[in-house]
Image (cartoon, rainbow, N blue to C red):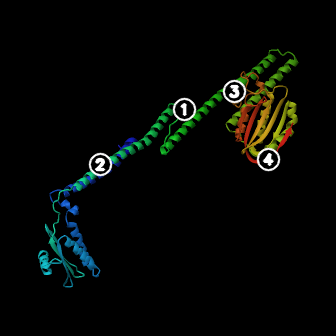
Amino acid sequence: MRLRDFSVRTRLMAANFLMVFIPVCVLAVLGAGILTGIKFTSSTEQSELAMLWPEKGPALSVQLAVSSLRVKAARKDEHKWKDMLEDCERLEAQGIRTEIIQDGRVRYVTAGTDAESLQQEVLARCGDSTSTMLWEDEHFTFYYVAPRSQTTILAAGDAPFLGQERPMGRDKALWRYILTAILGVAILVILLVGAYLSRLLSRQIIEPLSELRRAAAEIRRGNLDTAMTIRTQDEFGDACRDFDQMRLELKRSREQQRKYEQNRKELIAGISHDLSTPLTALKGYASGIIEGIAHTPEKQRHYVEMIYQGALTMEKLVDSLFLFSKLDLGRIPFHLEPVVLQDYFKDFVAEKCQELRERGIDLKFQGQSTACVSIDRMQFQRVIDNLLTNSWKYRRGDRSGVKLILSDRENQLQLDFIDDGIGVGDEDLPKLFDSFYRTDPARSNVAKGSGLGLAIVKQIILGMKGTIWAEQNPTGGLVIRIVLPTIERKEHETDIDC
């Protein structure tokens, strides 16, 4: 089994254990070594381990002084002499007599010591060797001849290699207890800190993963409403936030799919109903001609005209349905161009004013602050025609009053179509732009429209990067509000009445 096959929790716990265990072992070994050293140096047996504790004997001091004399004797400068005398004093402090011979004469000898006797004693022990250091239990002997400077150093005396037996004092015992306590506290602190860090790290990693796993299980069961609880700001928190964003996107996609499915069902139902009505009429008029009910030329002509009008209604319905389908699928290209809507409506009112008045529409345009927008002229004309036709169909009396108001917003242009018709209820406002939606639940009057007009308008406005919605007119009627992004601004005011 490889390391990656273990769980993250197991690997974290093992890593944290090793992180704590290794320092504890090092501290334990170090503490045991120190305590053992203290124990041996305080024992009645003269162990070799006592060499590590120079305060028990002169060994280290003697060795340092002898090594220093050896190095300084090899030098030829005169500045060494004072330093050599200091080393001799250190040896004499340990009870060792010293003598320095240079150029065949005695330059220095310990006070009260006969130079000839010291030379005989040292040479008797060291023989013909030019560099000898002997430490025989209680007696120390040193003989060295520097080859370059011909300086000879002799030293001899009674100096034990190990210190004399001395019972451990109260201070030594106190320090031993303090050291033991420090080691114990250090080990305890390492264990506690390691356990805390291990638990903290485990919680910061395992908890987000558990939350991620729980959220994934909810999504697998089809539940997209359960939000994730994210408390961390690290990489695991970022991963959880991205996963939760994915959940929200899936939820939005599902809701959109559900909406599309509902629209598809309503579309099929609307098509079936709106086609069945004129087809039934066509069938009735045609059978009336075939069966001889229309037996006079005038009646036959009337039946033929009704069949023709029914065919026109079906043709308009099919054309609207085809246009809406192409807009919904994005298969109609938009040829966008910059247009100053102030000038656009100025020309529109001048051209269509008489025609609209004859149709029963009284149009008034008011531009308070115009700007340039990017639109497809042909499709935008379809939007205006559909909105004006809608206002005329749902008028209160014989005529329909429509006001167009242009105003600037921040980097946007707002166009309001305000009519004085019968309006719609508040519950119907959000549904006006749905395909095949009509405020007449029975859909009895097919001639008033297929319910695709405002749906087509919405698709065209969306294709031009704009937005559209409906509001109640406080004085009665309906307000259709269109907002388009602007390209540039031009400030002036124009009122045109038709």
Q: Residue at x 71, y 27 (%)?
A: 426
In the displayed structure, 291 sits above or below 482; it is above
Let me know if residue 391 appears in the view. yes
Residue 117, by quadrant, is bottom left
Q: Which residue is mark 3?
A: 427
Task: Give the left or right position of residue 423, taking residue 298 as reference.
Answer: left
Numbered badge on residue 208 = none
Instruction: List the residue tagged with mark 2.
Output: 184
- First in sequence: mark 1 or mark 3? 1
Q: Which residue is mark 4?
A: 491
Q: In terms of image quadrants, where is residue 447?
A: top right
User: Dot 4: within a 10 Å radius of its alpha carbon, few (fewer than 14), some, or many (20 or more) residues?
Assistant: few
Earlier-in-chain disc, 2 versus 3: 2
Would residue 482 appear left or right of 62 to someone viewing this image?
A: right
Q: Could you tell me the amino acid type at mark 2?
A: Gly
Instruction: State the image coordinates of residue 124 (x, y, percent, origin top left).
Output: 11, 76
Q: Earlier in the sequence, mark 2 or mark 1?
A: 2
- How far apart marks 4 and 3 lie (CA) works out to 38 Å
* Gap between marks 1 and 4 measured at Cα: 49 Å
Q: Is residue 156 left or right of residue 251?
A: left
Looking at the image, which residue is at 28% across and 82% down? Answer: 78
Q: Give the amino acid at mark 4.
A: Glu
Q: Nearer the viewer, mark 2 or mark 3?
A: 2
Label 2 and label 3: CA atoms lie apart by: 77 Å
Label 1 secondary element: loop
Label 1 neighbour load within 10 Å: few <14, some 14-19, many 20+:
few
